[in-house]
Amino acid sequence: MCIRDSINAEYGAVADQTMVSVSGLLPGLVAVVVAYLTLLLVMDQEISDSHFNDQPKHWPLPGLRFKSLALQDLQLNFVEAGPEDATKCMIMLHGFPESASAWGEYISHYALAGWHVVAPDQRHVNQSVQVDGTAPTLELLAQDTAALITQTSPCSKAVVIGHDWGAGAAWATALQHPDLVEALVVFNVPHLEVYRWHNLAGMPFALKEAWYFLMFGLTRPLAYWKCVKNDYSWFIWFTFGSSEPGTYSKAEIQAYKDMYDTSLWNALSWYQMGNDWLMKGLLPWSDSLMGSIWKDGNTPSTVPTLQLYGSKDMYIAPGMAHKSLSHEYVSHPKKKMVMFDAGHWLPKERPQECMAEIDAFLSSPWP
């Protein structure tokens, strides 16, 4: 199915009126600029401390091994747990604006269950910064994950788990290096082609969820100024403020602020990467991951794939979830999608339920 067929199936009459064209995107981009300027001028929200719990920080976990992997253009820092000679391995990829510490409960659970677990501070996060400081690419994130599997893991394949941008990197790894991926587990992010065409085809309607994506990527200096202003008050409200009360602790939020002091500018480059990838997809030709949106056919995941979503996600439209499970996007017969009554921070809001779903999926028979 080509992009026009997908657009018509999803948007119907609306698609006939708006269609997908560069000119059709202009009103949406103008709307982004106007909305962003409005944000800068009038929005100064902050979240009350009572939204966060008073538990002490549970990081670093006992038994973690802190290591780094020397790649061509950076030192990729990661934590490792579990038996070093394990026969089953996992890679856990965090999203924005978090770090490897976001996976604390999951690392403990799977290390105790005998898994060899690796969780990196991904490219441009914390101290894992490219030497040249340029924006990463989805291809590079996939290469980083592949390097972690081949150079730090005792297994020839690994289960790759990701949330938010980490889910994007996990999808990219499964698409580019399926021979290294035992199974794919993604939180809150659909197949990358579903995400791309949904937002490009839906302009300007998709701005309801995607305005921040364009804002962070297209106006990075202004976005950075807005994020760091008043001790990150608006940024914390916009990100972790959407979590269920008590999901994060005050100690966790302070630790993230300390990290942002030295690395938030670099981490925002993920959205520069994302915008480059979206815009390149508008070209009739493209050498970026999955190429042009105008090509016939799609690039399906060929590995077992578990997709976990929160129905209250305010950043990524949950409606993309069901389409992402179709055969044109996940061709492997072992696949499942679970929708939780939760938000974008699903791994933290429902950790026990999510780990139970992962355990059940990984232990069920392979077709």
Image: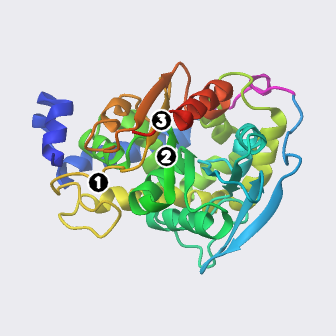
Is 287 or 223 nearer to us in this picture?
287
Q: Nearer the viewer, mark 1 or mark 3?
A: 3
Residue at 67% x, 47% y is: 98
Asked if the residue at tag 2 contacts the one at tag 3, i.e. Cβ–Cβ closer than 8 Å, the answer is no
Question: Distance of mark 1 from mark 3, alpha carbons?
Answer: 25 Å
Nearer-the-camera pick, 60 or 124: 60
Q: Position of residue 206 (x, y in %)?
A: 33, 36
The percent coordinates of residue 122 (x first, y second) are 63, 59
The residue to which callout 1 is attached is 299
- Label 3 vs 2, first from the N-terminus: 2
Whole-percent x and y of residue 325?
Answer: 34, 35
- Kind of residue sitting beneath label 3: Pro
User: Which residue, given by chain and number where applicable, does mark 2 sit on?
Assistant: 184
Calculate the distance from the C-alpha at mark 3 to the C-alpha at mark 2.
Answer: 15 Å
Q: Is residue 75 left or right of residue 144?
A: right
Label 3 sits on a secondary structure element that is loop
The magenta segment: 45-54
Q: Earlier in the sequence, mark 1 or mark 3?
A: 1
Question: Is residue 218 in view from this perspective?
Answer: no
Q: Place residue 265 in its image quadrant.
A: bottom right
| Location of residue 9 with respect to 78 vertically, above or below | above
Q: Residues within 10 Å of mark 2 (few under 14, many from 20)?
A: many
Query: Residue 365: which disc?
Result: 3
Q: Earlier in the sequence, mark 1 or mark 2?
A: 2
